[in-house]
Image (cartoon, rainbow, N blue to C red):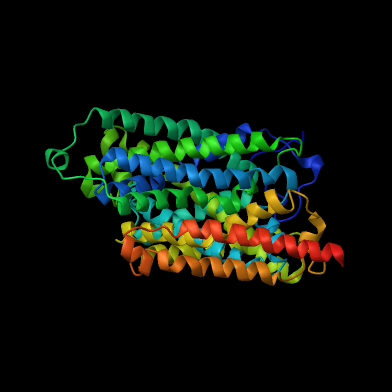
């Protein structure tokens, strides 16, 4: 096993990790995916769902089902990491072409940039209170800390996940205990609540979007594992960590939303109020918990950005100065978005969760269909970096399937600024269903015919 120190700057980027440099066990996948959900952003998803007028039990059921659906897909992506040894989105070149993979990659970079902005909005207040900073200064400091950790890379991120799995776990356990001892306010307890199918599906969709959004980068954190690690070990370690963490914390968010209905836009402040003691310590733990998710978003948004421009220039490695510059640019853009989205966190978070699933569900369906049902894990890694290799520069049939899948979802979409005709009629957002089924089925049929034609030729 190679000796890796947590503060050593990672040498690999989008390139293949040699077998001689592989190390670790699937257990570290459980800790990193469990810990990344132990933050107030995940609490905010549950608190947002608590405002939909459903009984608390039905809200938690919807969130649980959504997390289960998203987790199955993201864990299936994670299992590709040890086998292929490359970042998740580099593998997408086999489906879209070395240059064509830039299409879903742009969507991935966009969604993670929006996520980074959402993280900043949620820690801006506690960080500003701790250090007496204004919104812009607090966001800049948070961005600088994110940049340094993300630049060091893989090993430091995993070590951070181990620590936060314990520390953040204890923080939210205390919060849940104190919340259980606090009665629901009379005006909330007497509020009229009833099951409503549209609101149930909205909560389910947003939870599925949360866990599915990890799919485009989940293999980035398993690619250093030895290739002898079994697929089922990778799947279950990743899936259990993500499902347990997201479901427990979202359920806590639902209860916080019921106890503090006026604080759904400030879940960090609500957690501080619930615990009641050691306020500065609690605020620091909240900030650090969100910091982990921010680091992982920046790290993998960089991977996706590098995969785009490296495909155009047929690069296999990215230098550290370029890595630092790309990460800094992504953080600067996200900070600007956060400053523009002040005082609109509920609408902003709800919309980006929906947009993410519209863009990522078709990519996920195509990628998994190719890996498990068409090529069955058999890829030529060097050709993932060559435009004249077997995957080509642009695989137009896959690009057409992806764009068609996004278009097919339009009538089912429901956003604060747009509602499709079907969503308007049934009152529910079901766009992710055709977004998963249509491209997956189309890709299997079309790609098998393309491969058969190549075999005959």
| Residue at the image position 41 percent from the left and 64 percent from the top | 412
Q: Report x, y in % for residue 183.
A: 19, 32
Asked if residue 193 lies left or right of residue 233, the reply is left
Kindly indicate the quadrant of the structure image that contains residue 180. top left
User: Residue 340 location, x and y as percent?
Assistant: 37, 67
Residue 124 location (% of width, % of height): 36, 54
In this rendering, position of residue 369 left or right of residue 404: right
Q: Is residue 77 above or below residue 95?
A: above
- The image quadrant where one finds the C terminus is bottom right
Q: Is residue 350 left or right of residue 152?
A: left
Vertically, is 218 above or below 340? above
Is residue 292 in sight in this rendering?
A: no
> In the image, 289: left or right of 253?
right
| Near-viewer residue (370 or 88) | 370
Taking the view exactly as shown, the residue that stands out farthest to the right is 457
Quadrant housing the N terminus: top right
Q: Between 4 and 384, which is closer to the camera in this rendering?
A: 384
Q: Toward the viewer: 216 or 431?
A: 431
């Amino acid at each position: 096993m190679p000796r890796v120190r947590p503060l050593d700057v990672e040498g690999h980027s989008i390139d293949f990790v040699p077998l001689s440099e592989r190390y670790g066990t699937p257990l570290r996948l459980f800790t990193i995916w469990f810990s990344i959900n132990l933050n107030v952003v995940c609490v905010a998803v549950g608190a947002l769902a608590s405002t939909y007028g459903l009984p608390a039990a039905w809200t938690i059921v919807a969130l649980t089902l959504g997390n289960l659906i998203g987790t199955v897909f993201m864990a299936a992506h994670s299992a590709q990491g040890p086998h292929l040894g490359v970042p998740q989105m580099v593998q997408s070149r086999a489906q879209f072409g070395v240059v064509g993979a830039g299409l879903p990659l742009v969507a991935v970079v966009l969604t993670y940039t929006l996520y980074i902005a959402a993280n900043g909005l949620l820690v801006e207040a506690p960080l500003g209170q701790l250090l007496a900073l204004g919104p812009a200064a607090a966001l800049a400091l948070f961005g600088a800390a994110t940049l340094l950790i993300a630049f060091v890379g893989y090993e430091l991120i995993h070590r951070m996940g181990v620590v936060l799995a314990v520390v953040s776990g204890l923080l939210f356990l205390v919060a849940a205990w104190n919340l259980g001892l606090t009665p629901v306010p009379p005006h909330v307890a007497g509020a009229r609540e009833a099951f409503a199918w549209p609101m149930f599906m909205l909560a389910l969709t947003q939870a599925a979007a949360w866990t599915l959004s990890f799919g485009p980068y989940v293999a980035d954190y398993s690619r250093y594992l030895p290739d002898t690690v079994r697929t089922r070990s990778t799947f279950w370690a990743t899936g259990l960590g993500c499902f347990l963490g997201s479901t427990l914390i979202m359920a806590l968010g639902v209860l916080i939303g019921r106890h503090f209905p006026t604080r759904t836009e400030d879940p960090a402040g609500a957690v501080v109020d619930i615990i009641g003691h050691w306020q500065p310590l609690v605020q620091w733990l909240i900030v650090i918990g969100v910091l982990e998710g921010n680091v992982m978003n920046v790290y993998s948004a960089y991977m996706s950005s590098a995969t785009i421009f490296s495909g155009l220039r047929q690069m296999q490695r990215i230098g550290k100065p370029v890595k630092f510059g790309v990460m800094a640019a992504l953080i600067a853009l996200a900070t600007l978005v956060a400053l523009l989205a002040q005082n609109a966190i509920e609408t902003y978070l709800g919309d980006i969760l929906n947009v993410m699933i519209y863009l990522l569900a078709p990519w996920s369906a195509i990628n998994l269909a190719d890996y498990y049902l068409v090529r069955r894990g058999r890829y030529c890694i060097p050709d993932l970096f060559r435009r004249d290799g077997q995957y080509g520069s642009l695989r137009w049939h896959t690009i057409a399937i992806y764009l068609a899948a996004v278009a097919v979802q339009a009538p089912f979409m429901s956003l604060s600024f747009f509602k499709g005709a079907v969503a308007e009629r049934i009152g529910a957002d079901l766009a992710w269903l055709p977004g998963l089924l249509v491209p997956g089925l189309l890709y299997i049929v079309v790609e098998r015919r393309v491969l058969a034609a190549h075999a005959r030729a």
